[in-house]
């Protein structure tokens, strides 16, 4: 199953940067998204049960995420939702993952500073950025 999703939450584990044998850079972390609801009986706001996601970032996004994010940060993640069943022989379960396409701090909970990096974009990035420039 693959769906586009946007999720707000907090980073629950230290972001982990790895590089594969084919030089693919990956940063992964667990994200907890907690909703709020109003309890009419107590007339108070209450947290709902958290939804847990594994967030995977690739290439430049992985490098930038590992330099910018720490455990406890409130973030907004947009990407592709992947739900898959797993079984390792002893245990089985369902993994809920987000392949991040964009990621940033949630400014509802604090301030952030942005520093543009320079890199040589691939041709697809140049085309999509050129389409966004005003005429």
Image (spheres, rainbow, N blue to C red):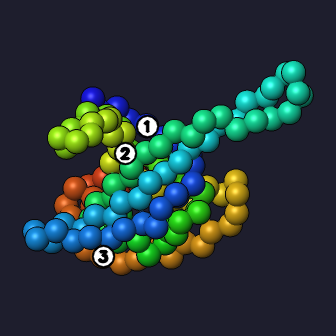
Mark 2: which secondary structure? strand
Q: Nearer the viewer, residue 80 or 123?
A: 80
Q: Residue at x 53, y 66 (%)?
A: 71
| Image coords of residue 42 (percent x, y) | 88, 27
Q: Local crowd at mark 2 within 10 Å, few (<14), some, or many (≥20)?
A: many
Q: Residue at x 37, y 45 (%)?
A: 98
Label placed on residue 5 = 1
Q: Quadrant of the N terminus?
A: top left
Name which quarter of the figure residue 29 lies in. Answer: bottom left
- Which residue extends farthest top? 41
Mark 1: which secondary structure? strand
Q: Is residue 88 visible?
A: yes
| Image coords of residue 19 (percent x, y) | 21, 71
- Tell me the CA gap for discs 1 and 3: 28 Å
Label placed on residue 98 = 2
- Tell me the CA gap for discs 2 and 3: 25 Å
Check disc 3 and report the residue beneath it.
119
């Amino acid at each position: 199953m693959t769906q586009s999703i946007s999720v707000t939450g907090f980073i629950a584990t230290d972001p982990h940067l790895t590089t594969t044998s084919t030089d693919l850079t990956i940063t992964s972390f667990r994200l907890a998204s907690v909703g709020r609801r109003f309890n009419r009986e107590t007339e108070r706001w209450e947290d709902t049960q958290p939804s847990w996601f594994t967030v995977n970032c690739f290439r430049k996004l992985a490098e930038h995420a590992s330099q910018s994010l720490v455990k406890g940060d409130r973030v907004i993640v947009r990407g592709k939702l992947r739900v898959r069943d797993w079984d390792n022989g002893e245990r089985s379960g369902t993994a809920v993952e987000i392949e991040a396409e964009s990621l940033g701090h949630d400014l509802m909970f604090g301030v952030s500073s942005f520093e543009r990096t320079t890199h040589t974009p691939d041709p697809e990035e140049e085309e999509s950025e050129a389409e966004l420039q005003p005429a």
